[in-house]
Every structure is written in C-alpha cells, then in structure tokens.
Image: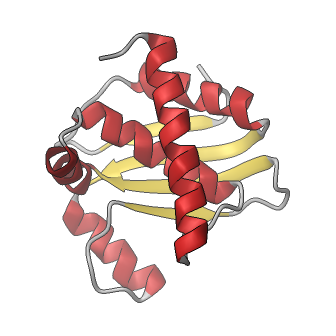
Amino acid sequence: MVKNLQVNFTDNFKSSKIHFHELVKFLEDELNFEISSIQINFISSKRILEINVKYLGHNYFTDIITFNYSEQINILEGELYISYEEASKNAQKFGVPEKFEYFRLVIHGILHLLGYDDQNKNAKLVMKRLENNLLKKFVNQLNLR
C-alpha cells in the first residue's frame, strides 16, 4: 500500500483498492514524485455536479475534479473526485473496460497535481499523450486485460 493515499468509494460503487494503490505507486516511480497526502474519491454524477457548481461555478457534469493543495511540484497533496457514472459512460463510448477508464482518470488527476494543464489545445494534446502512454505501460506491466 502507498503511504498517505486514501481511496474512497461511495456505497453504490465498489472496486479493488489495491489496483489504485499499485497505479499510484507506478506513477510515483514513472513521474518521480512523493505523496504528502492524496485522496481519490469515487462518487456519483449527482455529487460531482454539486462539487462542480459549489467550488468551481460550473453547472455541468464532468468525469473528474482535482483539487491541488501541493506547495511543491514533486510533493503532491490533493483530492481527486471521480464520477464513476461518467467514467462508465466514457468507457462505453470509447469501447474500453471500465477499470481502464478509472485508471485513466486517476492518471489525469495526478498529472494535474504535477502541474499539467488541459486548458488549451496544445496542452490538452500533451497531457492526453502522456496519459495514454502511462495507462498502456501500467496495464501491460500488470498484465491486465
């Protein structure tokens, strides 16, 4: 288990926490960071909409919201809120296993904690390529299908 990492599921969503710990450990090694404190929360679409409206002023559904509290770029502290329902829709839309979409969103959130941005076309492209490469490498390393 990775120290200072919490993975939380709502009552309606269950998964193996060990895979998320393995993923974050993999990302620590690949991207050279340490964890001060990270919470990964899998929540409903309704709950993520509430957070999006209350804290970001956005009145729409999203698959992930990242709150970055890090004071140093390589010592991460933050919260990831992942809508398991939006992730499931994305998995169906793109024809990938749901667990791979959950992994992709965790990678996406960690990249945000590291300072990556997806606010413009070029930054989004860089982030997406790195996200896809890390996901592929992780899935191959664990022999997941």
User: Which quadrant, please, contains the C terminus?
Assistant: top left
Q: Position of residue 16 (x, y in %)?
A: 34, 23
Q: Which residue is rendered at x = 71% and y = 54% of the image? A: 114
Left or right? Give the position of 78 relative to 115. Answer: left
Q: Position of residue 144 (x, y in %)?
A: 36, 15
Say if 3 sits above or below 10 in the image: above
Q: Which residue is rendered at x = 18% and y = 40% of the image? A: 95
Q: Where is residue 93 in the image (x, y as percent from the top left)?
A: 16, 51
- What colouring does the structure picture have? secondary structure
Instruction: State whether residue 42 appears in this view.
Output: yes
User: Which quadrant, please, contains the N terminus?
Assistant: top right
Left or right? Give the position of 104 relative to 61. Answer: right
Of all residues, the one furthest to the right in this rendering is 72
Left or right? Give the position of 128 relative to 62. Answer: right
Residue 13 picture quarter: top left
Q: Which residue is rendered at x = 27% and y = 66% of the image? A: 47
Q: Position of residue 113 (x, y in %)?
A: 66, 56
Say if 140 sits above or below 127 in the image: above
Total marks drawn?
0
Q: Which residue is rendered at x = 37% and y = 73% of the image? A: 51
Instruction: State whether residue 39 appears in this view.
Output: no
